[in-house]
Amino acid sequence: MAKKKRKFFSLFVFPGLIGILLFVLLPFGDVVKRSFTTAVTGQWNGLKNYETIFHNQAFMLAVNNTLKFTIICIPLLVFTGFSIALLLNGLKSKKWMKSIFLFPLAMPTATIVLVWKMVFYRQGFLNLFLSGLGEMTGLWGEIHKDYLGSNAAFWVLIGSYIWKNTGYTVILWLAGLGGIPLELLEAARVDGAGKWQRLWYIILPNLKGSLYTIVVLSFLNSFKIYREAYLTSGAYPDKSIYLLQHLFNNWFVNLELDKMAAAAVCTGSILMAVILLLQKLWDKQEV
């Protein structure tokens, strides 16, 4: 029986492993090789490509912006999703609410970008609203701030990320909350535990699995915000939202494949290191 189970397990896993080998590991191995060679001749170049990118101002700017974006967005997204999930968890009919929160994921990126442009450009709805408010109160005059062409673009991008990704975060938190036995919460309430005590000692410890999943997905999705930034401001946006993906795109257009390969290896290594670190922390907590 055990041999039969292993056979079926292998049949299901083997195609996936072949796909990962052909479409992930082998191409990434080729990128690693190219990171040590010149772009045109393919001659061995040692670590010069890595030295070049770490002395490149555009690369360092993109790294700093990407790290800043990720560090700010993930805690905001996790906290926002958890807060909304706690509020929804007490409602009896929350199916239609789930659909509303998942709606942004179903919207095409181009549509989302069009909405943000209509709201945040010089003659957009936000400036019109603020100008009308200033005129009504007499506190200020007309406002024509270009939010997408200034440092404010960074916060617009963060708002876009939170708005789009909160839905799946709420659903994952609700799934975790739904898995907590009601008997535990009821027993704690009978023993005199208040809402905050039940949250801290029962709910949060039982949501570690959900937290790990949400953090990893949010971390990976934070690297997909490039589409919104590119469609909003083009290949050379305000420096506050110049991300790694902008840099890769510009290097690809200029056929600077050696620098792009070296930067891709560094980025992939960091992503893998962060995910392994989260997994290690999760395994420690499980023990």
Image (cartoon, grey):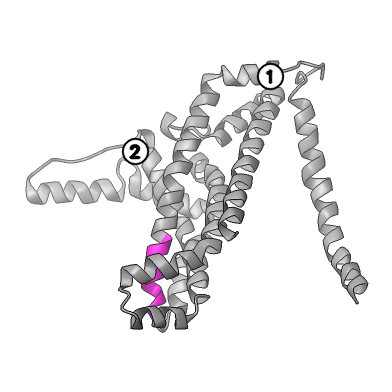
User: Regarding mark 2 in the picture, which secondary structure is present there?
Assistant: helix
Residue 87 part of the magenta segment = yes
Check disc 2: other Cα within 10 Å, few if <14, some if 14-19, many if 20+: some
Name which residue lies at 31% across and 78% down: 192
Which of 246 and 34 lies nearest the eye of the viewer?
Answer: 34
Q: Quadrant of residue 265?
A: top right
Q: Which residue is mark 1?
A: 49
Q: Main secondary structure of the magenta part?
A: helix
Residue at point 20%, 48% (across, down):
130
Query: Relative to residue 185, is residue 51 depicted above or below?
Result: above
- The quarter of the rendered structure image containing the N terminus is bottom right
> In the displayed structure, does residue 124 sit left or right of residue 233?
left
Residue range corresponding to the magenta coloring: 81-91
- Quadrant of the frame with the C terminus: bottom right
Front-most of residues 117 and 43:
43
Residue under the image location 66 percent in, 29 percent down: 252
Can residue 14 be found in the magenta stretch? no
Say how many tags the image has.
Answer: 2
Verify CB contact (< 8 Å) between mark 2 and mark 1.
no
First of labels 2, 1 by sequence position:
1
Q: For the residue labelled by badge 1, is the local secondary structure a helix, a strand or a loop?
A: helix
Closest to the camera, between mark 2 and mark 1, is: 1
x%, y% of residue 83?
37, 64
Q: Of the residues shown, which amino acid type is indicated by label 1?
A: Asn
Which residue is depicted at the point 68% across and 26% down?
262
**Residue 195 image point, x, y percent:** 32, 72
Q: Badge 2 is on which residue? A: 152
Q: Amino acid at mark 2?
A: Ala
